[in-house]
Image (cartoon, helix red, strand yellow):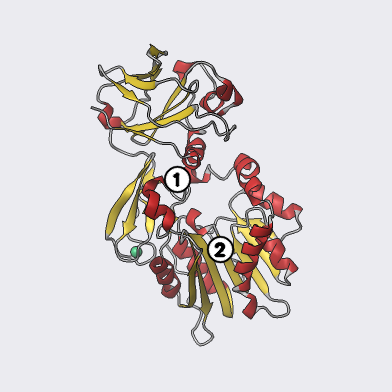
Amino acid sequence: MSRLTSRINPHIYRVARAIRGRTQPNAALGSPSPYAQWHGPDAAAARTPILVCTSVADIVLLQGCAPTGAELAIELDSEQTTHPVTHRFPHPDTPLGPRRCFEMTFDRSSAGSATRARLVADGTAGGWVAIPELPKPGAMTGAEHIERCPACTRSDFAAAGRRQHLVMVTCQTCGLMMTNPRPIEDHTLVRYSERYFDEEYLPSQQLTPALTTHIDSILDHVEPVKRPGASLFELGVGGGNLLARAAERGWLVSGTDVNPASIAHGESRGLNVWLENADHADTLQGPYDAVISEMSLEHVRRPEHFCALAAADLAPGGRLVIYTVSAEGESFEQSGMASPLVGPAEHLFLFSAGSLVAMCEAVGLRVDTVWRNHTGDEIGIVASKRRDIANPGVPRR
Ligand SMILES: [Zn+2]
């Protein structure tokens, strides 16, 4: 019996969409793009069931779109039984529309000898779709294993759960949750495209009063170290709202991002930003009076390296502020791996208070404040560079 599970969260299949963008077209469908079939407007309007089958690592992903109300099941050619599709959700292009879409995954190794799958809608079977071959069942391709916790360096991990293609584990010492094993960097960087920036990211950055209030609350943490000519650096500038606001408040601002579209956008706003991947940087080009990572550290591969860079590039007395996502809040408590915070191909880390403190203290910074938002799903830390301790420098790989 195959172990089939349903996946219904829109956030996570946006993540899957980035991965799927690299996969080969499914020849059995005769279509140049699974994306066009499954995510495009044609899919939203489809009257006949659509099934797309792809695989990443050892996980087979079935996605489809079918008329509202139809009873759906997946049939594998190796079995006599079908597997009901129990969860449906609206098409992403029409988020308020009917629940027409579904997503299911199963372990390739548990699919036995199955080579094809098909969708059965109200008892009528659609065409067979090939299940992609895998080089070795059970083995993830293009994976990178984390041997030691980046925050506390211990190796005592416990499985936290599985989401779609990936497993997350929690460090039993400091509470850091991480995707492990994780896709190699070339695969995770695919996410940060121009399309992602324009269509998904930027629309979420409309400068509402609430967002302005949030940005100001972050900047308030570095206000005490602002002096005439004070400099502020941001990791992951995104749409540039924080830097623009900091400039208004009198800071000399600069920052980096891994997405060229973000840099182009920031330059169009007159910001001093450059394309750089902090995971490979030797310096942040400081010194700065303030270094800020606001909702970016969960995306980087080496958060401890960023802390080292920040510590090295802060002026004595300067402050580091990290604001990020946490698995210690209500969302994870109530929903576990189904939480919208969980997107293991994109959010490579979900931070704990212990892990943030450990990373800051490991590079010689003094932890001043740790705080959370009202749900506990977001967590912040302020750490200062002491004036009486020499520059710790940046450890090499
Ligand atoms: Zn740890």
Which amino acid type is marked by label 2?
Answer: Ser
Reply above or below: 209 against 116: below
Can residue 112 be spotted in the picture?
yes
Q: Quadrant of residue 345?
A: top left
Queried on whether the Cβ of the residue with tag 1 lies below 8 angstroms from ligand 1, the answer reads: no
Q: Earlier in the sequence, mark 1 or mark 2?
A: 2
Residue at x 46% of width, y 22% of height: 69
Q: Quadrant of the N terminus?
A: top left
Q: Position of residue 392 (x, y in %)?
A: 47, 77
- x, y percent for residue 71: 40, 21
Whole-Å distance between the Cαs marked 1 and 2?
19 Å
Find numbered disc 1 in the image and state the secondary structure of the residue it sits on: loop
Say which mark, if any, is on residue 345. Answer: 1
Q: Secondary structure at mark 2?
A: strand
Q: Quadrant of the C terminus?
A: bottom left
**Position in image of residue 158 (x %, y %):** 28, 55
Name the residue that disc number 2 marks. 293
- Quadrant field for ligand 1: bottom left
For disc 2, the neighbor class at 10 Å (few under 14, some 14 to 19, many from 20) is: many
Residue 393 visible to the viewer: no
Instruction: Say above or below: 124 vs 32.
Output: above
Judged left or right of residue 173, residue 236 is right
Disc 2 CB within 8 Å of nearest ligand 1 atom: no
What amino acid is found at the position of numbered circle 1 in the picture?
Answer: Ala
